[in-house]
Image (cartoon, rainbow, N blue to C red):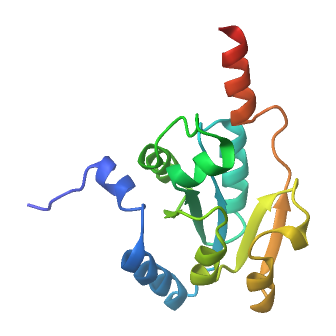
């Protein structure tokens, strides 16, 4: 009888690090797949994240998300963040059908990760100037694309947290 993986195992398989990430990148490259990379804290997944990530996934064959570790989020957003731990955030992101893989980075920026991934397309929100995007130089050098996308208005984890605090 064929062993079928349960859905949770399939989701967990999309969370990659170390050699697993390197091997998967190599396989994607061998197949000629174009790799789209974006990153963030993705602390409380909301409609704005889903809209942004689904549109980013349409820019290539593979959508790889660089996810800030818990320590990294604390340094960037404050001691009371993240709301959800890194594995919970990774599981939520990996559960989306349009997300190919999620990988963690412990630094404040994904520069070292972008160096390793060498994406064909680098995506960030339009609140960034293209040339100020971390990894711009890496992707430009390999003649890749740097794309900025508008966020869905009215959606932000910080706004949600602010609203909850003000209602207490």
Q: Is residue 131 above or below residue 75?
A: below
User: Where residue 97 sits in the image (x, y, percent)?
Assistant: 51, 53
Name the residue at 65% across, 61% down.
Answer: 108
Residue 18 visible, this orientation = yes
In the image, what residue occupies the spot 24% across and 55% down? 5
Q: Indicate the position of residue 162 as horizontal and vertical percent values.
A: 73, 23
Residue, far left: 1
- The quadrant of the rendering that contains the N terminus is bottom left
Q: Closest to the observer: 124 or 164?
A: 164
Instruction: Give the left or right position of residue 160, taking residue 15 as reference.
Output: right
101 or 39: nearer the eye? Answer: 39
> Where 58 sits versus 120, above or below?
above
Residue 33 visible in the shown view: no
Q: How many circles with numbers are drawn on the protein?
A: 0
Write the residue at 58% across / 80% down: 117
Residue 121, above or below 69: below
Q: Nearer the viewer, residue 129 or 147?
A: 129
Query: What is the x, y in percent for residue 134?
Result: 76, 70
For the C terminus, the quadrant is top right
Residue 76 placed where, x, y %? Answer: 67, 50
Q: Which quarter of the figure has residue 131?
A: bottom right
Relative horizontal placement of residue 90, taking residue 113 as reference (left or right): left
> In screen coordinates, is 24 left or right of 125?
left
Considering every residue shown, the one lying at the far top of the view is 168
Q: Residue at x 82, y 31 (%)?
A: 154
The image quarter containing residue 138 is: bottom right
């Amino acid at each position: 009888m064929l062993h079928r993986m349960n859905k949770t195992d399939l989701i967990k398989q999309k969370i990659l690090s170390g050699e697993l990430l390197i091997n998967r990148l190599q396989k994607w490259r061998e197949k000629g797949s174009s790799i789209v990379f974006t990153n963030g804290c993705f602390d409380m997944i909301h409609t704005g994240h889903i809209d942004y990530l689904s549109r980013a996934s349409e820019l290539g064959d593979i959508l790889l998300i660089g996810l800030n570790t818990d320590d990294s989020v604390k340094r960037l957003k404050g001691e009371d963040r993240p709301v959800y731990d890194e594995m919970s955030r990774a599981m939520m992101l990996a559960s989306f059908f349009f997300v190919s893989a999620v990988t963690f980075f412990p630094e404040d920026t994904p520069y070292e990760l972008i160096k390793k991934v060498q994406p064909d397309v680098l995506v960030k929100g339009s609140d960034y100037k293209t040339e100020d995007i971390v990894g711009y130089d890496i992707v430009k050098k390999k003649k890749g694309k740097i794309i900025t996308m508008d966020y869905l208005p009215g959606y932000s984890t910080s706004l949600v947290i602010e609203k909850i605090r003000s209602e207490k």
